Image: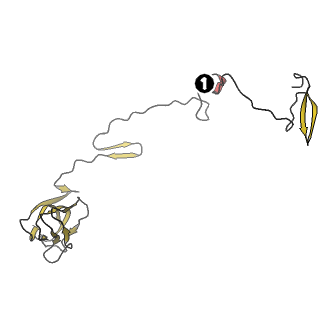
Amino acid sequence: MSDLIAPVKMLRWDTGTLTWISWDGSLTTGALVIGAVTQSGTWTVQPGNTANTTAWKVDGSAVTQPASLVTLPPLVAGTANIGDVDVLTLPAANPATAFGKTLTYVSINQSVAGTTILAAASVGNKHKIVSAIIVMSALGTVKFADGVGDLTGPMDLATNGGFVWPASIAPYTETAATNRALNLVTTIGAARGVVAILTEA
């Protein structure tokens, strides 16, 4: 650099003293402070130093890697395998069965409060409630019993009030032993609705 730039005089502040020094254009670490540097024109940052002509590499092979879009065929009923994911399409359920077991749907339409037999005793089987919809005509209570004892406590319901037990794998309640009837017992108000019952050992 000293061959290109003639020595110049410059002021230097050194340990409290301002003096003129001669600078030959050479740079010494820590000796000078260079101000802001700006870059004008076009910066080319692609590989090959030629804009928009050389692809970037995405691995260590120095070979351009292609990208592709894969379109999967539509799924059909049954079992299909896509890589490590198994897709199973279940057949439509028979509304009269649940998990291969037959249900009995019992309509409830009491005219007055009292005991209604939902299912008569079945030898060797229990009656299990797997779903129910109950609405009361007037303020009162409703409970389930099996002719020997209560299966639920009395549930207080307001006039036109009720409850829904969504279909469940596990029964909400069942007769305490085989060969017992399943009863609905109400007080004051009459019950309306439907109960789904599974009868099995």
Q: Is residue 30 above or below residue 46?
A: below
**Closest to the observer, 60 or 152:** 152
Amino acid found under the numbered disc labelled 1: Thr
**Closest to the observer, 121 or 1:** 1
The N terminus - image quarter? top right
Q: Residue at x 19, y 65 (%)?
A: 129
Secondary structure of the residue carrying tag 1 is loop
Question: Where does residue 167 sit, x and y in percent of width and height?
Answer: 23, 58
Question: Where does residue 30 sit, x and y in percent of width and height?
Answer: 85, 39
Q: Is residue 2 above or below residue 18?
A: above
Q: Is residue 77 above or below residue 132?
A: above
Q: How is the image coloured?
A: secondary structure
Q: Residues within 10 Å of mark 1 (few under 14, many from 20)?
A: few
Q: Which residue is mark 1?
A: 54
Query: Toward which corner of the image does residue 45 lie, by quadrant?
Result: top right
User: In this view, which residue lies farthest toward the bottom?
Assistant: 148
Question: Where does residue 84 sit, x and y in percent of width and height?
Answer: 42, 45
Q: Is residue 31 above or below residue 126?
A: above
Horizontal side of residue 82 vs 57, given as left or right:
left
User: In this view, which residue lies farthest toward the left?
Assistant: 111
